[in-house]
Image (tube, rainbow, N blue to C red):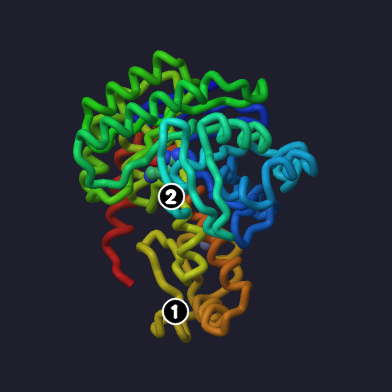
Amino acid sequence: MIKVEGYSGKARATTITTEHGEIKTPIFMPVGTRASVKCMWQEDLYEMNAQIILGNTYHLYLRPGHELIEKVGGGLHGFMNWDKPILTDSGGFQVFSLSDINKITEEGVTFSSHIDGSKHLISPEKSMEIQKGLGSDIVMAFDECPKLPATKDTLRESMELTLRWAKRCIDYKLRDYQKLFGIVQGGLHKDLRTECMQRLEEMDFPGLALGGLSVGEKNEEMVDFLNDFVHTMPDQKPRYLMGVGKPLDILNGIRAGIDMFDCVLPTRNARNGQFLTHDGPLNIKNLRFREDTLPADPSCDCKVCKTYSRSYIRHLYTTGEFLAGNLITYHNLYFMIKMTQDARQAILDDRFDDYYKEFYNRYTSRKW
Ligand code: PRF
Ligand code: ZN
């Protein structure tokens, strides 16, 4: 399912093939939790060259339900009319971060819905059943994601549970075209991570993800871990860093050898007025932009930056016009996708380190 096209240091460019098309990596995947990338038309996403989007088992199971999505659309692709690849997260992480957990047992996780308080059990089999109904191209195993810091004993126990759940996931019959990714847990301990990865490798998942990062540890600890670990992952399988992150985290991940990323920040922060720019994040609420006629990011060639001034978008934002969220989201996703495309080209030209340094220096040199 993967063709590795080249390395520049540990960074790599690949093509991943799925039922709904190819993904050129490194890639940022916009998050469409509830079958919508918030504020975006699918057309906008095609236009900015989004190659794959993400959906969430937990949310779609609760509303509108995977049965309805399957009945009405034959799956998520038909339901939302998106014909490129889709990856769905398994619900494990969202159950832990959003719901009132009642208990975690060998069987699965019992929780109360964040919407109406109703009680549910998601087990590895239930997560697979939901993701089968959704028909995503890439299905994630059901895992437990402990918050950091945690003791090594806790991390080991959690990792063992994740491995037993992984086995139940891989034994479940999905649709023929669906690819199931295993999730490596184990905190910041290289020995636990290596053991977890080897035991997942014995089950032979077609792709591997790193979970349990960006969950309370220092940023530097995550980056050190990635530099130390990612290059030991199997060469001929996609490598996905889950829920990470900010632009510099992604560049650091690419430098360590990660292929795929997702994060809600570019879309969520957009709705709080934050533009990502080559000179660092900029908040449009700031009074200094009141009469500023420049585009949000003068180095960006997206249609928002070609059309509108900071002053105008600030006005939209401060008066509560919905267009503001739409414009900022569009730019931010364009920015993330362009950044990974430029990184890919730099890898193919074997000049990734120069690209990294240039981006990093400019991004960190100016404070708005
Ligand atoms: N597991 C799953 N989804 C996730 C994570 C995880 O550990 C994270 C952690 N950064 C984000 N999304 N299943
Ligand atoms: Zn722009």
170 relative position to 177: left or right: left
Tag 1 or tag 2, which sits nearer the N-term? Answer: 2
Q: What residue sits right under mark 2 in the picture?
A: 101
Q: Position of residue 349 (x, y in %)?
A: 41, 32
Residue type beneath disc 2: Ile
Q: What residue sits right under mark 1 in the picture?
A: 285
Q: Which residue is depicted at the point 30% across and 52% down?
A: 360
Q: Position of residue 90 (x, y in %)?
A: 52, 38
Q: Which residue is depicted at the point 58% across and 66% down?
A: 304
- Does 289 appear above or below 14? below
Q: Nearer the viewer, mark 2 or mark 1?
A: 2
Q: Nearer the viewer, residue 57 or 252?
A: 57
Element at label 2 = strand
Q: Nearer the viewer, residue 351 or 89?
A: 89
Query: Quarter holding the N terminus?
Result: top right
Q: Position of residue 20 (x, y in %)?
A: 67, 32
- Does 109 appear above or below 278? above
Q: Is residue 241 visible?
A: no
For residue 84, which numbered disc appears in the image? none
Query: Quarter holding the C terminus?
Result: bottom left
Q: Nearer the viewer, residue 299 or 106?
A: 106
Q: Residues within 10 Å of mark 2 (few under 14, many from 20)?
A: some
- Does 19 appear above or below 250? above
Element at label 1 = loop
Occupied quadrant, residue 53: top right
Q: State the residue lying farthest toward the top.
A: 202
Residue type beneath disc 1: Lys
